[in-house]
Amino acid sequence: MMSVAENLRTLKNSLPAGCRLIAVSKTQPVERIKEAYDTPHRIFGENKVQELVSKAEMLPRDIEWHMIGHLQRNKVKYIAPFVHLIHGVDSVRLLEEIDKQGMKAGRVISCLLQVHIAAEETKFGFSHQEIEDLVGSAEIKSLKNVRISGLMGMATFTDNTDQVRQEFRGLRTLFERLKNTQLPGIFDIRELSMGMSGDYRIALDEGSTMVRIGTAIFGERNTA
Ligand SMILES: *Cc1c(COP(=O)(O)O)cnc(C)c1O
């Protein structure tokens, strides 16, 4: 089995310039994260607030922590003081709560809007139409402590690579359209977060700027 360091090096060499690698460290012990940190690597993603907070406390302060999972409003306050980017914003109410906690922490918190692109019912996110409505809506224009930096999506979990490609391509099209539209000041559309261990190559072909990769770096997660 390849080491964390080797996996990271191989992955980084295959990324186009300007694309960032989020090392998804959920369920991994801090020793494994430290191994990646020492290669060096500084960008890590977690999907649970409690795990994110406790790991951030145990690990060096110069890590850029990304919240990649579904985020409940009542937990935003725990990550607001330090989180670098929240990938999965899927409601206006959540955005408003992030704004409120950003204000308390004296920060502007960068967020990505999660778009529902998969065929599965269970994945969170806005529809394309909801995104179009949201960018034109008055209610978010006044938010001062959030910045919407782009979009995030998860493709269907399937072996059908054509389907995955079409889903990523659709998200890219929406992303390009927003990027080329004059939007209110809270928008600064530049990031397109798509691609995981199983589908990141397709996501890169389709213009991803951030891939979120766990198992291809750390190996299979121990879910027991
Ligand atoms: C776990 C997770 C990933 C990484 O998944 P791998 O298949 O291990 O690369 C990416 N994005 C999100 C939102 C995740 O929850």
Image (tube, rainbow, N blue to C red):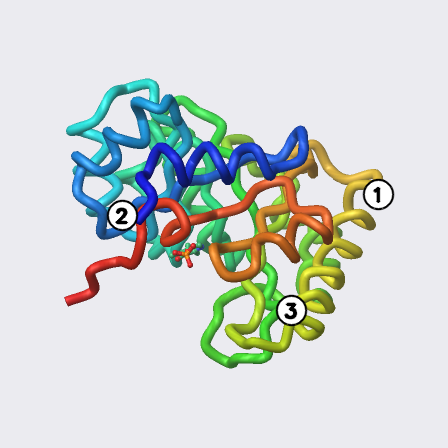
As displayed, is residue 90 above or below residue 103? below
Residue to which mark 2 is pinned: 49
As displayed, is residue 200 above or below residue 144? below
Residue to which mark 3 is pinned: 164
Residue at 67 percent across and 35 percent down: it is 16
Q: Quadrant of residue 156?
A: bottom right
- Which one is earlier in the sequence, the residue at label 2 or at label 3? 2
Q: Given the image, on which type of amino acid does mark 1 rest? A: Thr
Q: Does the beta carbon at disc 2 come under 8 Å from ligand 1?
A: no
Residue at 31 percent across and 26 percent down: it is 37
Nearest the viewer among 149 and 60 is 60
- Which one is earlier in the sequence, the residue at label 3 or at label 1? 3
Camera sees residue 133: no
Residue 52 percent across, percent down from the top left: 26, 42
Q: Quadrant of ligand 1?
A: bottom left
Q: Given the image, on which type of amino acid does mark 2 rest? A: Val
- The Cα–Cα distance between marks 3 and 1, rounded to whole angstroms, is 26 Å
Q: Quadrant of the C terminus?
A: bottom left
Residue at 75 percent across and 63 percent down: it is 170
Residue to which mark 1 is pinned: 181
Label 3 Cα neighbours within 10 Å, binned few <14 / some 14-19 / many ≥20: many
- The Cα–Cα distance between marks 2 and 3, rounded to whole angstroms, is 28 Å
Q: Is residue 216 left or right of residue 206?
A: left
Q: Is residue 193 left or right of residue 63?
A: right
Q: Decide: marks 2, 3 in contact (CB < 8 A)?
A: no
